[in-house]
Image (tube, grey):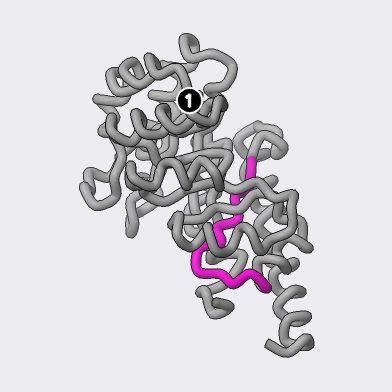
Amino acid sequence: MANEDLAAIGLEIRDNLARVNDQIAAHARKAGRDPREITLVTVSKGISRDIMALALEAESRVFGENKVQEAQVKIPQMPAGPEWHMIGRLQSNKAREALNLFSLIHSVDRDSLAASLDKHARERGKPANILVQVNITGSVQQGGVPIADIPGFIDKISNLDYLRICGLMAIGPYPADESVLRSGYRSVKGIFDSLAGRMGESFRIISTGMSGDFGLAIEEGSTMVRIGTAIFGDRRYK
């Protein structure tokens, strides 16, 4: 890609990031919250290293990847400094590689995955930071633990010494109207609040909201939003 093309894309990404950050702040204030409570995860799946570097220059500091295989190629090519999150579904046989790449795993929803992460974290001598994925849509393909089963699932995996449960993650229904989205995200906040008193200081993250609905998610309690399209467009920069 020509340098002048990269320069133009860099300006567009910088503008998009500024717009997203302004919107995050506006929705946080609308909900009576401090915008600094919200972490922006820049979703970089399918994005080339050159374009990701432009987002880093524009002050993206946390990146989210969906596939271990893609991240294994891209992350070593990037400068040191960014924080990397695994936001896609993770197979148990990829747990070791994921822990070598990511500081936070967003999508823990199975006993087998929790046990595998605990095993490899124990081998490393360092706890695995995880979020429990909540299924608020009923879609099996989406993954996640049904809301009614969340307390029991968390009780079970809390016995694994090398898992640090940092909060909850959910994917909103799509397409859906505002009332359905709000209801789903409100239910995640409700289950989070019901658990927080007994989970300790590390339990502080609600990862909900993406490019099309992050404002609603913030108003309903999200502390972490995962945004790709609103920053990178329609992935034309692969």
- Of the 4 image quadrants, the one containing the C terminus is bottom right
| Nearest the eye: 63 or 38 | 63
Image coordinates for residue 74, horizontal then vertical, percent: 58, 63
- Residue at position x 40%, y 28% in the image: 119
Image coordinates for residue 105, horizontal then vertical, percent: 48, 40
Left or right: 17 as drawn, with respect to 145: right
Which region of the structure is painted magenta? 39-50
Which residue is under mark 1? Answer: 122
Asked whether residue 102 appears in the rendered view, the answer is yes
Q: Measured along the vertical axis of the image, is residue 228 above or below residue 126?
A: below
Asked whether residue 18 appears in the rendered view, the answer is no
Image coordinates for residue 181, horizontal then vertical, percent: 38, 46
What is the crowding at mark 1: few (fewer than 14 residues within 10 Å), some, or many (at least 20)?
A: some
Check residue 105 for magenta coloring: no
- Residue at position x 65%, y 46% in the image: 83
- Residue at position x 28%, y 29% in the image: 111
| Nearest the eye: 237 or 32 | 237
Image coordinates for residue 224, horizontal then vertical, percent: 57, 41
Check residue 44 for magenta coloring: yes
